[in-house]
Image (tube, grey):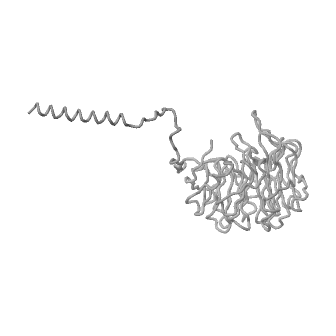
C-alpha cells in the first residue's frame, strides 16, 4: 500500500512540474520595472483633501459681507486664497484655488450687487513672509468663476473701492512691488467695470497706495493714502517725504495733498485712514512718523484740518488699519499685535481680552445691526464675538495655514 501511494505521488508531481515547464516556455516575457522608476504608475486616482479642523489657522487679511444677507461672507487669506460661506460660517469653501495667486490683499463686494466680487491679489503688508500677486480679479457669479482684470505688475493691492452709484466705476489702491521699485503703482480708475484702467494718481517708482475711500454721500469725493516703502534683505525702509494723504472732489481727475495738522517732513511712514459711516464728515488717521510726531489724528471737516488725539500708533510694516463702528462715530478699533479700542474718538485706548484668541489682528467687521457682534481676522484665523470682544468663538473649520 505504501508503495502504491508513493507511485501515485510521484506521478502527480511529475505532471505538475511538466505543466509548469510548458507554461513557462509559452509565457509572454515580463518587462523588468526598475525600482526607482514611476513612469508606468499613475497618481490620477489620488486627490488632496483637507484634514481639518485647524488647530491654528492662517493670516486673515480681509472680510467682505453681503449686506443683504450677512450669513454670506468672503474671507481673504494672506496665504491661502479666498473662502466663502453661505451659512454663517458653518462651512467654508475655497473659491480661488484655480487662479494665478494664493496671496490676497483685499476682497470687496459691489455695493449695488453682492454677487459681483472683486479681489486684489498680493498681501498688502510689508513683512518678511509676504507673497506677491498677479493683479485684480472679478467674479460676476458670487465667486463661482473669475477673470483677471489686469494690473498684474502691482504685486500688492491695498484696497478696491466700487462706486455705490455706478458699478462701472472702480478704484484700486496699488501698493506696487515690495522688494523693488516700479510696477503698477498708484491709484487706478476704471470706468468700464475693469476692462481698462487709468492711473489717476501716481507719486514715484518708490511710492504706492495702501488705501482708497469713497465718501458714501458723494462718490466724487475720494481719500487716498500713499506710502513710500521698500523691503531689503537687511531690513524694511518705511517712510519718506512722499508718504501723504490725498483728497479728490472730482472723481480722481485732480488731487490735493492733505497737510493741515498732520505730520510732514522726510520721515512719514504708513498712514491708515477710515471714514465714520454714521457721520462721513469725520475722518480718522493713524500715522507713522519720526520724532514722536506720529500718532492718532481726527478731522471733523472732511480732511480740511486735523487734530492729534493721542500718541496711539501701530506698525506700518504689518498693521496700520482702522475700523469704525457704523453706529458710533467715536468707537474705533485699531489692528495691532493686540486689538485696541477707543470709545472717545481716539483720545484714550484700551486692549481687548485675548483669552482663547490668537494675536496679530488685521481686519475687523462690525455688524451694523448689532455693534457687539464682531468678526476679527488675525494671524491665527477668524474669530467671532457676540459680547463686544469679551469672549471669542474660533472658526476651526477654516483650515488654512501660512509658513
Q: Residue furthest left?
A: 1
**Circle count:** 0
Say whether residue 128 is left or right of residue 21.
Answer: right
- Which residue is located at x 8 percent, y 33 percent? 1
Q: Looking at the figure, which quarter contains the C terminus?
A: top right
- Tell which of 161 and 388 is nearer to you: 161
Q: Nearer the viewer, residue 51 or 365?
A: 51
Toward which corner of the image does residue 258 lie, by quadrant? bottom right
What percent of the width, then of the height, locates residue 70? Answer: 64, 65
Quadrant of res 30 = top left
Q: Name the residue rendered at 62%, 63% in the picture.
A: 72
Q: Nearer the viewer, residue 383 or 145?
A: 145
Q: Give coordinates of residue 277: x percent, y percent.
A: 76, 64
Above or below 305: residue 7: above
Instruction: From the top left corner, tell me how far across and down residue 244 is, in percent.
Output: 86, 49
Q: Is residue 323 left or right of residue 11?
A: right
Image position of 230 (left or right of 403): right
Q: Position of residue 218 (x, y in %)?
A: 84, 66
Amino acid at each position: 500500500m505504501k508503495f502504491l501511494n508513493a507511485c501515485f505521488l510521484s506521478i502527480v508531481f511529475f505532471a505538475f512540474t511538466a505543466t509548469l515547464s510548458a507554461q513557462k516556455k509559452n509565457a509572454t516575457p515580463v518587462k523588468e520595472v526598475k525600482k526607482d522608476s514611476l513612469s508606468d504608475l499613475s497618481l490620477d486616482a489620488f486627490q488632496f483633501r483637507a484634514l481639518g479642523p485647524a488647530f491654528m489657522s492662517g493670516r486673515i487679511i480681509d472680510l467682505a459681507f453681503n449686506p443683504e444677507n450677512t450669513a454670506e461672507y468672503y474671507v481673504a487669506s494672506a496665504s491661502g486664497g479666498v473662502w466663502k460661506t453661505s451659512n454663517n460660517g458653518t462651512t467654508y469653501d475655497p473659491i480661488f484655488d484655480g487662479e494665478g495667486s494664493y496671496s490676497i490683499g483685499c476682497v470687496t463686494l459691489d455695493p449695488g450687487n453682492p454677487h459681483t466680487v472683486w479681489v486684489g491679489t498680493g498681501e498688502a503688508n510689508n513683512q518678511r513672509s509676504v507673497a506677491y500677486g498677479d493683479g485684480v480679479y472679478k467674479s460676476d457669479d458670487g465667486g463661482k468663476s473669475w477673470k483677471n482684470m489686469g494690473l498684474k505688475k502691482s504685486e500688492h493691492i491695498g484696497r478696491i473701492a466700487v462706486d455705490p452709484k455706478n458699478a462701472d466705476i472702480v478704484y484700486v489702491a496699488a501698493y506696487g512691488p515690495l522688494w523693488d521699485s516700479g510696477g503698477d503703482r498708484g491709484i487706478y480708475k476704471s470706468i468700464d467695470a475693469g476692462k481698462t484702467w487709468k492711473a489717476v494718481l501716481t507719486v514715484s517708482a518708490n511710492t504706492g497706495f495702501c488705501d482708497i475711500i469713497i465718501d458714501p454721500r458723494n462718490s466724487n469725493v475720494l481719500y487716498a493714502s500713499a506710502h513710500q516703502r521698500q523691503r531689503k534683505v537687511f531690513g524694511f525702509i518705511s517712510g519718506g517725504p512722499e508718504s501723504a494723504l490725498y483728497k479728490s472732489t472730482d472723481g480722481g481727475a485732480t488731487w490735493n495733498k492733505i497737510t493741515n495738522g498732520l505730520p510732514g517732513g522726510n520721515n512719514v511712514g504708513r498712514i491708515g485712514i477710515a471714514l465714520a459711516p454714521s457721520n462721513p464728515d469725520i475722518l480718522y488717521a493713524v500715522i507713522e512718523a519720526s520724532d514722536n510726531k506720529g500718532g492718532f489724528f481726527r478731522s471733523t471737516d472732511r480732511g480740511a484740518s486735523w487734530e492729534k488725539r493721542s500718541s496711539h500708533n501701530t506698525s506700518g510694516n504689518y498693521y496700520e488699519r482702522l475700523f469704525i463702528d457704523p453706529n458710533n462715530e467715536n468707537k474705533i478699533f485699531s489692528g495691532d499685535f493686540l486689538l485696541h479700542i477707543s470709545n472717545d474718538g481716539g483720545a484714550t485706548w484700551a486692549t481687548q481680552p485675548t483669552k482663547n484668541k490668537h494675536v496679530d489682528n488685521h481686519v475687523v467687521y462690525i455688524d451694523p445691526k448689532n455693534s457687539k457682534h464682531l468678526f476679527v481676522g488675525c494671524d491665527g484665523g477668524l474669530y467671532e464675538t457676540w459680547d463686544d470682544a469679551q469672549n471669542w468663538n474660533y472658526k476651526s473649520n477654516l483650515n488654512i495655514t501660512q509658513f
